């Protein structure tokens, strides 16, 4: 039976032009919808122990369907995390032990399973699980401190009671977030289990329509990726044909490739967000106008992602939950260093190694840091320059300026994505050499030129003020 099922899936994957592992992943994510419907109609406001069991069993089934017996990796880390919390209590030692063990286990998995290609294997959901379990250790530690000593964020996520093993398992294996996220806290999960996350107290949430909207949007991006993705393979960067193309063509290809490549991540996050909304976990209270918000598990701000001409705008709209997690548990926890740049660098370094051990990840996030730094300096220069501010405010010039800005925006979004997708130094170095390291040179030039330009601008302002 298993062999027949595997053969059937293999044939279907070939027909769709995808790998069997990718097809299993998509089917597993989509299976969240019938599971969420079952939970809505048969488990809402039922015994929490039944809901924990349901989430644990369904999550384990999804893990086995995708990774077979390798599901023991997640089970081992979850049980050990529970024991760390129980035996070490609300201590700094427990937090450090959790952080080192969970991250170390993930990095060991990367080391022993890594190849030169992107493979869907047990380390993919395990990186999501790693953040969940480390975050749980921090929140449990915060739960033992005086409320007055905590920041508003820490107060919101602090775990007051000692988690039980069923709670930790249900939290970790919840079918709507096990494979590709999103991240959510133990407090949020427990509110979900007790039926508190609903727009109609005591009744099932009216979340069917918003869930279907996210599913439809996710399927739209999936279709777009499946139609255009085969024409924009990563491997084309390494061919002689690409190297022999005109320089402008290589840049345009990189721009379009980067945009379409990101759609596979957008697809997964939108579909899983729909699952979370349907089950109720996506409920996020009401806004100032009284409208119900379903964005508690949103990993994408689609409109901002598609329209922003800024790198910081794309970062703010993409993989939101992971970025928030790193800001909360890495960046803000390093406040004692007293240096924002160091904290930001440490956060990006954590993100790089969390993705994997390939050099491409480090290069990608280093470039992201450089690009954001330069963009901020450019915006400061435009703001301080009356001439540039006036040019940018002319209505007739806004559309062409926006188009030019968008081209550079997506060109230099695709540029750091090259090492992220090609992994090894020999591959991404070949691509960067073929475009003459245009991104590195451009941003390093701006990095050193902008402070001088701003200095000249300030001096001119001072002279004008003195002359008046």
Image: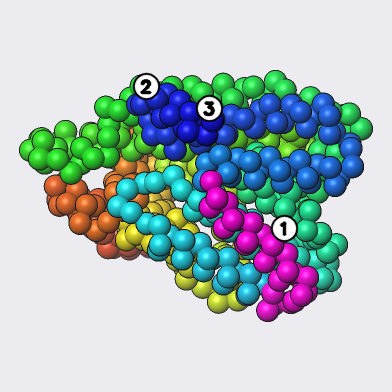
Position of the C terminus by quadrant: bottom left
When asked about the image quadrant of residue 175, the answer is top right
Q: Secondary structure at mark 3?
A: helix
Q: CA distance from mark 3 to mark 2?
A: 21 Å
Name the residue carrying label 1: 153
All told, the count of numbered labels is 3
Q: Which mark is residue 15?
A: 2
**Residue at label 3?**
218
Q: Secondary structure at mark 1?
A: helix
Left-right relation of 373 to 218: left
Residue drawn at x 40%, y 62% as measured from the top left: 112
Residue 25 in percent (x, y) is at 51, 36
Q: Main secondary structure of the magenta part?
A: helix
Q: Position of residue 396 (x, y in %)?
A: 35, 24
Scheme of colours in the image: rainbow
Residue beneath the point at 51% across and 69% down: 104
The quadrant of the rendering that contains the N terminus is top right
User: In terms of image quadrants, where is residue 89?
Assistant: bottom right
Q: Magenta stretch?
A: 68-94
337 is higher (above) or lower (below) than 310: below
């Amino acid at each position: 039976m298993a062999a027949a099922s595997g053969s059937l899936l293999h044939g279907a994957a070939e027909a769709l032009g995808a790998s069997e592992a990718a097809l299993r992943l998509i089917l597993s994510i989509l299976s969240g919808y019938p599971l969420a419907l079952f939970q809505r109609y048969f488990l809402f406001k039922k015994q929490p122990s039944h809901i924990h069991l349901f989430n644990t069993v369904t999550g384990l089934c999804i893990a086995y369907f995708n990774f077979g017996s390798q599901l023991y990796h997640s089970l081992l880390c979850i049980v050990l995390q529970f024991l760390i919390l129980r035996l070490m209590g609300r201590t700094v030692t427990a937090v450090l032990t959790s952080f080192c063990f969970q991250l170390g286990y993930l990095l060991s998995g990367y080391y022993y399973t890594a190849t030169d290609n992107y493979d869907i294997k047990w380390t993919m959901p395990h990186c999501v699980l790693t953040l969940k379990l480390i975050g749980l250790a921090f929140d449990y530690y915060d739960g033992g401190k005086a409320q007055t000593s905590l920041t508003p964020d820490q107060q919101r996520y602090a775990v007051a009671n000692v988690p039980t093993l069923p709670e930790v398992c249900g939290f970790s294996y919840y079918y709507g977030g096990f494979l590709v996220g999103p991240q959510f806290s133990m407090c949020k999960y427990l509110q979900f289990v007790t039926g508190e996350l609903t727009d109609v107290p005591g009744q099932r949430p009216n979340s069917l329509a918003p869930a279907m909207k996210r599913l439809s949007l996710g399927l739209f991006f999936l279709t777009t990726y499946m139609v255009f993705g085969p024409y924009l393979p990563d491997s084309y960067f390494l061919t002689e044909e690409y190297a022999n193309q005109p320089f402008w063509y290589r840049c345009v290809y990189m721009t379009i490739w980067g945009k379409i490549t990101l759609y596979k991540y957008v697809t997964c996050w939108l579909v899983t967000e729909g699952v979370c909304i349907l089950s109720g976990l996506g409920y996020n209270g009401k806004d100032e106008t009284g409208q119900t918000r379903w964005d508690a598990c949103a990993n994408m701000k689609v409109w901002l992602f598609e329209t922003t001409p800024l790198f910081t705008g794309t970062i703010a709209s993409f993989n939101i939950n992971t970025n928030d997690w790193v800001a909360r548990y890495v960046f803000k926890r390093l406040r004692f260093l007293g240096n924002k740049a160091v904290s930001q660098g440490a956060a990006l370094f954590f993100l790089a190694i969390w993705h994997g051990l390939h050099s491409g990840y480090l290069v990608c996030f280093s470039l992201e840091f450089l690009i954001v730094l330069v963009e901020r300096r450019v915006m400061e220069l435009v703001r301080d320059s009356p001439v540039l501010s006036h040019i940018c405010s002319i209505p007739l010039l806004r559309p062409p300026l926006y188009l030019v800005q968008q081209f550079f925006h997506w060109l230099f979004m695709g540029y750091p994505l090259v090492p992220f997708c090609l992994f090894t130094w020999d591959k991404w170095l070949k691509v960067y050499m073929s475009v003459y390291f245009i991104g590195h040179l451009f941003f390093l030039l701006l990095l050193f030129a902008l402070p001088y330009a701003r200095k000249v601008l300030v001096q001119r302002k001072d002279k004008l003020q003195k002359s008046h």
